[in-house]
Image (tube, rainbow, N blue to C red):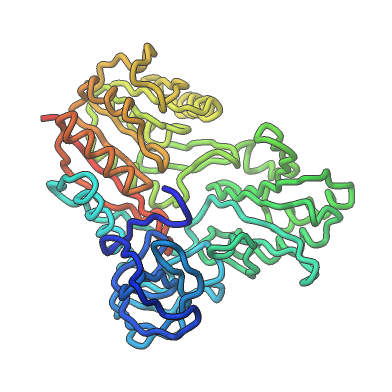
Amino acid sequence: MSGRRSAVVRDGGVQSGAASQPARGERETAEVVGLTHDGEGIVRGGKTVFVPGALPGETVSFERTRRHRQHDEGKLLEVLRPAPERVAPRCAHFGVCGGCALQHLAPDAQLALKEQELRDNLERVAHVESRTWLPPLRGPVWGYRRRARLGAKYVPKKGKVVVGFRERLAPYVADVTHCDVLAEPVGALVQPLGELLGSLDIRQHVPQIEVAVADNATALVLRVLRAPGEQDLARLREFAARHAVRLYLQSGGLDSVAELTRDESAGLSLAYTLTDFGLELEFTPTDFVQVNGAVNRALVARALELLHPAPESRVLDLYCGLGNFTLALARSAGSVVGVEGEAGLVERARHNARRNGLTNVEFHVGDLSAAADSPAAWLRGPYTHVLLDPPRVGAAPGMLAAIARLAPELVLYVSCHPGSLARDLGLLVHEHGYTLESAGVVDMFPHTAHVESMALLRRP
């Protein structure tokens, strides 16, 4: 995807401008016909305008604020005829903070919109239709976000440090006092964190806070560009003790992350549980874990339900991370092989397998972007099932070809981008002969325009 936004939008496309256009700042009135991938209203009639805060079906007044070759940006002035799905945003910072894009749309309507985007991508990009549609996987819509990266900035004019997500479509840190989507206790600690950083001598040298809320502890990793002195360290330790959080300092790369404080009763590691499978997975505060803990548990349970591994099953889990799906699969399958490109995650996955007493699972470090003709042992098979959960760019064509050569009966694709999912499903169906059995959305990121989904394919 290039540029600030994708040119593909949820009502079918972007229209170029007409010969005569309203002047910048001139008040216009029009109906909203769709949403962009960033959750902005689309207005037609002459040159397309993207209007944040406007919803499909609404009649709004707006003004154009910035022009581009294929579209303009607009500012919402007034909602003249609201959509029935419009709700009052819960957060007073909505519209300024870039952490959320859809708080003004009812949660059920958000899910319907995301499902429609998945359907549109399958039809338009993949040219396939799912035999059945899975009911959406959902969980809490507030206080769900257990992983986040927050900005921090000392603002001399305000005489304080602001902490939060970046402003919507701007590089500044949003000046917020709390966050309703961050998991507790972090949601309520946004302002206290700003006050803490503002009290430090190194207040101008802490640009970022990484958040990890585990089942057994809350970790905050402070990126420090200058080492804190003894007084600053004392303030940091006092804050950690008062709010029952673990603080880490990061002075360079990930290998520089060092724990400053620890609650001894919580153990050495952060951990989350998959209670349906009797699993506890340990991770570090900078490891990738799924953002929404409740939805992740439902996602893993559905993956097992769809793949239905048996004692004779041999499963390949690609992009396996620290074993989120792999270890649950190992509870039922005869054997499971997990492959991940990051060596640190593979180390944690092996540790988690040992910790949970699983001996029928193995993990490998592998370059999944170039594995088409790899001689690696893990790619030789045979496998009855394959699960893949790639990054936003999707799987490499060579990796899809390698999966097809393995000829598993079932392939489960977990995706965080409907466009790359549709592209890859199109290849698996049209070039490699698989059938799309079922598909559905996963509400991993409520109030955002992010679309997570899953699709099950079967070999004829």
Q: Image quadrant of residue 152? A: bottom right
217 relative to 187, above or below? above
As drawn, is 147 to the left or to the right of 381? right
Q: Dividing the image into 4 quarters, which one contains the C terminus?
A: top left
Residue 181 point in image, percent of width and height: 50, 62
Residue 83 found in image quarter: bottom left
Residue 229 or residue 224, whichever sits in front:
224
Q: What is the number of callouts on the image?
A: 0
Give 112 or 129, whichever is nearer the viewer: 129
Q: Residue furthest right?
A: 230
Using residue 439 as the reference point, say whether residue 324 is left or right of it: right
Above or below — where is 199 with respect to 61?
above
Q: Give the residue displayed 41% in from the left and 68% down from the top.
A: 40
Q: Looking at the image, which is closer to me, 1 or 23?
A: 23
Residue 180 screen position, x and y as percent: 53, 66
Residue 120 visible in this rendered orientation of the protein: yes
The one nearer the camera, 262 or 434, is 434
Q: From this viewpoint, which residue is outermost toward the bottom?
A: 80
Image position, residue 182 (x, y; %): 54, 60
Q: Position of residue 269 (x, y in %)?
A: 60, 37
Residue placed farthest to the left in the image? 460
Residue that appears at 56% across and 52% down: 148
Image height of 355 relative to 266, above or below:
above
Residue at x-position 75% and y-position 46%: 224
- Establish if 52 lies above or below 330: below
User: What residue is rendered at 75% in x and 52% in y?
Assistant: 206
From the viewer's perspective, tell me whether residue 251 is left or right of residue 427. right
